[in-house]
Amino acid sequence: MAAPVHHLDVTREFGVTGEHGFHSGRDYRAAAGTPIRATMAGVVVRVTAEQVVVESNAIWHFYDHLAGPEVSQGDTVETGDCLGVAAGPHLHYEERVAPYGPGDHRNPRFDLHPNARLRA
């Protein structure tokens, strides 16, 4: 497992309820241009102008608020590979289980693991 950003500064936790309702992921401080890394190896199943989704072992890993995805749908990525760069001021990281709908998110488990590593 790898951390999605180099400095793990969490700005908003999963499950916090605020003016926008239930928060479905974990936000990390990520200035514009910060490299965003894959937390696990998998296949890229979705890419938009601001989002990359990687499927790993029946879990979808969402990386939101990117300024320039560097992968394409169908690409295989390894743990720690760069997916793109942050648009700033934060990265939204989320995990969903099948059937992968908006209500299928869970408390992220693969981003803050004590053995998380970063590729140089």
Image (cartoon, helix red, strand yellow):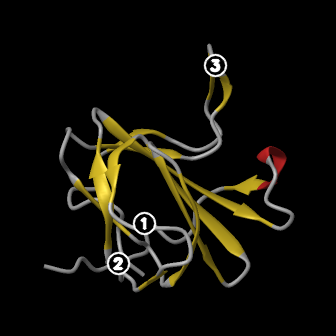
Compare marks 2 and 3 and give the one earlier in the sequence.
3
Q: Which mark is residue 112?
A: 1
Secondary structure category for the residue under label 2: loop
For the point 45% across and 43% down, which residue is it?
Answer: 50
Image quarter hosting the C terminus: bottom left
| Above or below: residue 107 compared with residue 118 | above
Seen as rendered, the residue at the extreme left is 120
Q: What is the three-letter code of the residue carrying label 1?
A: Leu
Q: Position of residue 80 (x, y in %)?
A: 32, 78
Q: What is the three-letter code of the residue carrying label 2?
A: Ala
Q: Position of residue 115 (x, y in %)?
A: 36, 83
Mark 1 surroundings: few (<14), some (14-19) or many (≥20) residues within 10 A: some
For the point 21% across and 80% down, which residue is it?
Answer: 119
Q: Nearer the viewer, mark 2 or mark 3?
A: 3
| Above or below: residue 70 compared with residue 101 | below
Compare marks 1 and 3 and give the one earlier in the sequence.
3
| Above or below: residue 76 compared with residue 112 | below
| Above or below: residue 11 compared with residue 55 | above
Q: Nearer the viewer, mark 1 or mark 3?
A: 3
Q: Would you name the residue on which mark 3 appears?
A: 20
Secondary structure category for the residue under label 1: loop
Marks 1 and 2, how far apart at CA:
7 Å
Of 48 and 93, nearer the camera is: 48
Marks 1 and 3, how far apart at CA:
24 Å
12 left or right, relative to 30: right
For the point 20% across and 39% down, which residue is it?
Answer: 31
Q: Position of residue 66 (x, y in %)?
A: 37, 45
Mark 2 surroundings: few (<14), some (14-19) or many (≥20) residues within 10 A: some
Q: Are marks 1 and 2 in contact (CB under 8 Å)?
A: yes
Of 44 and 21, nearer the camera is: 44
